[in-house]
């Protein structure tokens, strides 16, 4: 059987069963249909179904279900539960006749459960199975293992029951599947790095970091991919950003592995600016393009230097602080990271070689414009704001802009 035939047969088998998706957007697709039902629903019918799926293989006592879904009702008054189960059965099997036994829901006076013998497909089971198979094949058939891992990662569209962050019973499985996703990404990208597939590894890591932006092992692997591709500037910026996050948000310093990777940027064999100067390769320095990007500490030193220069030579210079409004970032750290990265890209393209900028935190950038008056700074800030709106296709997005003259010291 060809791969195309196998895929077609697999799709046919999948379409003939009840398909349940819990990773990312919750939804259920009935056999033979394409239209999903129960999408991101918080109705008691679907909360009950989610609970039964989350505890599949167990008969749940009706008192437990009543306590969970109707805590203000009498535990022995199960009329509401019976009605909810009846409606759930009808939603899952709209063509079921009268009192015909349900294929998916088992209910008695004392308990209810999901029928494991029913024809169904559950994304978390598929995801976990593929990860297990890939890990076991890692030493004997790396190519097949990589293929299985990539198939598994494509199933992880987001956290487990992400639309229900306050469900206490979902916290443990949510963290379990997230850790499994991170571990799977880490293992498959290590394999790609071993075969020097730097760019491919970097692409998978960037996608994974959209789901968990602060997973340290993934950040470390991304830095290794940058180093492998010779993207020293990107590696330095990643180290600066993540180490700053660790210190400000968690109060900890980078791990020893992080520090050892950073030392590679200063390795004598690396074609660094310091090595170029020592070897007299000044013509290479002349080819450097774009503004200077630095960490906050260095930016402060450049600002002090500029104030001293103005005291000696005169002239005007400006400091711009660009900030994303909190409503633009929202409660999602992932969203804030994406928008800030777009803003950085635009700023980099608009600045001159003599300009300097740095990221202050997740929402703010600082720009030093030597020999630029306030009028020119306002024009630049407006251009950046308009370009960001156009890039994100969001005319309601506003930048918080603070422009100050740099005073002589």
Image (tube, rainbow, N blue to C red):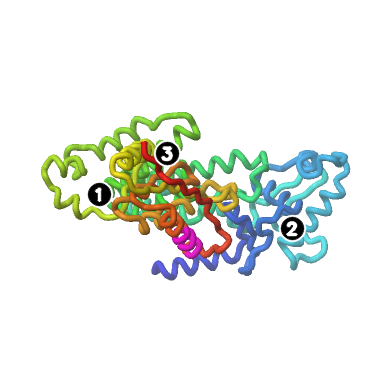
Quick check: 348 above or below 10? above
Which disc number belongs to residue 94?
Answer: none
What residue did someone put label 1 on? 230
Residue for badge 3: 216
Q: Gap in Å between the C-alphas at discs 2 and 3?
A: 46 Å
Question: How far across and how far down the image is residue 82, in percent?
Answer: 83, 51
Mark 2, residue position: 102
The residue nearer to you, when weighing 144 against 175, is 175
- Within 10 Å of disc 1 (Cα), the crowding (few <14, some 14-19, many 20+) is some
Q: Secondary structure at mark 3?
A: helix
Q: Secondary structure at mark 2?
A: loop
Identify the residue shown where x is 49% and y is 32%.
250
Q: Nearer the viewer, mark 2 or mark 3?
A: 3
Residue 146 shows in this picture? yes
At label 2, counting other C-alpha atoms closer than 10 Å, the crowd grade (few under 14, some 14-19, many 20 or more) is: some
Mark 1 and 2 residues: CB-CB less than 8 Å, in contact? Answer: no
In the rendered structure, does residue 396 fall within the stretch colored magenta? no
Measure the C-alpha gap from mark 1 to mark 3.
Answer: 21 Å
């Amino acid at each position: 059987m060809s791969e195309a035939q196998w895929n077609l047969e697999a799709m046919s088998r999948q379409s003939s069963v009840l398909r349940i998706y819990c990773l990312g957007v919750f939804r259920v697709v009935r056999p033979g249909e394409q239209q999903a039902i129960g999408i991101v629903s918080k109705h008691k019918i679907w909360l009950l179904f989610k609970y039964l799926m989350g505890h599949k293989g167990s008969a749940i006592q009706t008192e437990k279900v009543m306590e969970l879904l109707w805590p203000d009702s009498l535990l022995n008054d199960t009329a509401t539960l019976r009605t909810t189960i009846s409606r759930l059965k009808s939603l899952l099997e709209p063509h079921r006749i009268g009192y015909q036994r349900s294929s998916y829901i088992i209910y008695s006076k004392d308990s209810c459960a999901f029928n494991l013998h029913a024809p169904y497909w559950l994304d978390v089971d598929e995801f976990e199975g593929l990860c297990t198979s890939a890990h076991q094949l890692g030493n004997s058939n790396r190519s097949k293992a990589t293929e299985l891992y990539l198939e598994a990662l494509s199933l992880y569209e987001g956290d487990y029951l992400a639309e229900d962050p306050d469900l206490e019973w979902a916290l443990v499985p949510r963290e379990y599947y997230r850790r499994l996703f991170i571990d799977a990404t880490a293992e498959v990208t290590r394999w790609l790095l071993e075969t020097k597939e730097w760019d491919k590894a970097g692409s998978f890591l960037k996608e994974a970091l959209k789901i968990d932006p602060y997973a340290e092992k993934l950040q470390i692997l991304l830095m290794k991919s940058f180093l492998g591709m010779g993207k020293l500037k990107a590696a330095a910026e990643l180290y600066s950003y993540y180490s700053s996050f660790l210190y400000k948000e968690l109060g900890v310093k980078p791990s020893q592995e992080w520090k050892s990777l950073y030392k590679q940027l200063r390795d004598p064999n690396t074609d660094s600016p310091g090595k170029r100067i020592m070897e007299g390769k000044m013509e290479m320095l002349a080819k450097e393009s774009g503004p200077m990007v630095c960490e906050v500490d260095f930016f402060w030193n450049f600002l002090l230097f500029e104030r001293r220069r103005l005291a000696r030579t005169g002239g005007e210079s400006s400091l711009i602080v660009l900030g994303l409004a909190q409503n633009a970032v929202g409660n999602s750290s992932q969203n804030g990271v994406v928008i800030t990265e777009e803003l950085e890209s635009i700023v980099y393209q608009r600045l001159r070689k003599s300009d300097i900028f740095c990221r202050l935190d997740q929402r703010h950038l600082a720009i030093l414009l030597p020999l630029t008056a306030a009028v020119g700074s306002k024009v630049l800030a407006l251009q950046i704001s308009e370009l960001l709106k156009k890039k994100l296709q969001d005319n309601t997005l506003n930048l918080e802009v603070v422009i100050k003259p740099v005073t002589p010291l």
